[in-house]
Amino acid sequence: MAHPATAQTAARSWQRIAPAEAGFAPDTSERIEKAFAAGELQGLHGLVVLRYGKIALEHLFWTGQVTAVRRPNDFARLYDLTERVIPAHVLARPAPAERDARKELLLLAAKHHGVGTMADLTDYHRMKNADCKPLLDELVEDGQLQVVQVEGWTKPAYLHPQARVPRRIEACALLSPFDPVCWNRDRNERLFGFHYRIEIYTPAPKRIFGYYVLPILWGDSLVGRLDMKADRQAGTLLVQGAYAEPGVPAEALAPDVVQELHAMARWLGLDRVQIADRGDLASTLQRVAGQYARVDA
């Protein structure tokens, strides 16, 4: 469900993004009988008559009239009426004023980031810098954020008071292309020195790493990427390409990556992991996993 701040902002979105349908009053209570994915929009007779059916659906989502959960085993949204998804006691809470809600979103972004520039914090919840600059100043004046300078950054940053620097980070994860770590390209390169672009919409001959590429988070660094595909008919998780960043110790990295591949295969309900030859990390992963590694239940 949309946060009250985004819901309030989106309340004016219908007239802005779909002027031809500005007279339409979105009322879905009699049109949505059960949860559905956007691809099933044709089944909603009241919505398909709209020229901007998908836009209308997104408008309903951002204004809180419908909400969404993740469909099992993939990233698709399942939309449903908000009252069938969100508990009544949560819906009964009063919505804050837009100004207060924006400040809360900025604090949440700062808490999740630890430290970030104004653009980092506003981008986290897709807000505009001009709207948020005076609010950040207020948060600093109130002691809820601290202005700091980060080595190598050209712009001032904001530090959340609860931010902590752990002595050591032991983690390995395959990040979705739509993870917040990935979608803010500028922050990604400032923090990790990692150049990442989603190539889904790039013509195949022009792709560098592949169609659906997942960055590898290892410790506190982005150390490589995998071109992934789920072959459900064959019950196989395909690693179509595997690449390490320069200087990354492939032999040390590979066992942790293979463990994550098996975890992903189990989550997707697949039986095996198959690693192709493409990429400088591929042969090391193959030695660790076996080219047709069976996934343990």
Image: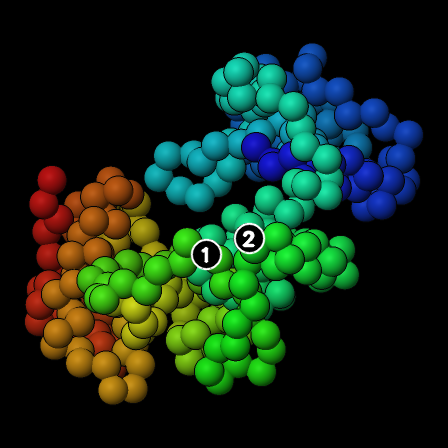
Q: Is residue 268 left or right of residue 123?
A: left
Residue drawn 18% across the image and 52% down it: 262
Q: Earlier in the sequence, mark 1 or mark 2?
A: 2
Amino acid found under the numbered disc labelled 2:
Gln
Quadrant position of the N terminus in the picture: top right
Residue at 29%, 86% in the rendered image: 246
Check disc 1 and give the amino acid type.
Pro
The label number, if any, that marks residue 144 in the structure image: 2
Q: Is residue 280 left or right of residue 98?
A: left
Where does label 1 land, which residue?
A: 161
When the figure is inspected, residue 240 is found, relative to residue 56, above or below; the finding is: below
Specify few, some or many for label 1: CA neighbours under 10 Å numbering under 14, 14-19, or 20 or more: some
Q: Residue at coordinates 60% horizontally, 21% vertically from top-left?
A: 93
Q: Residue 60: percent from the left, percent from the top?
A: 69, 31
Mark 2 lies on a secondary structure that is loop
Q: Position of residue 18 (x, y in %)?
A: 83, 42
Image quadrant where one finds the C terminus? top left
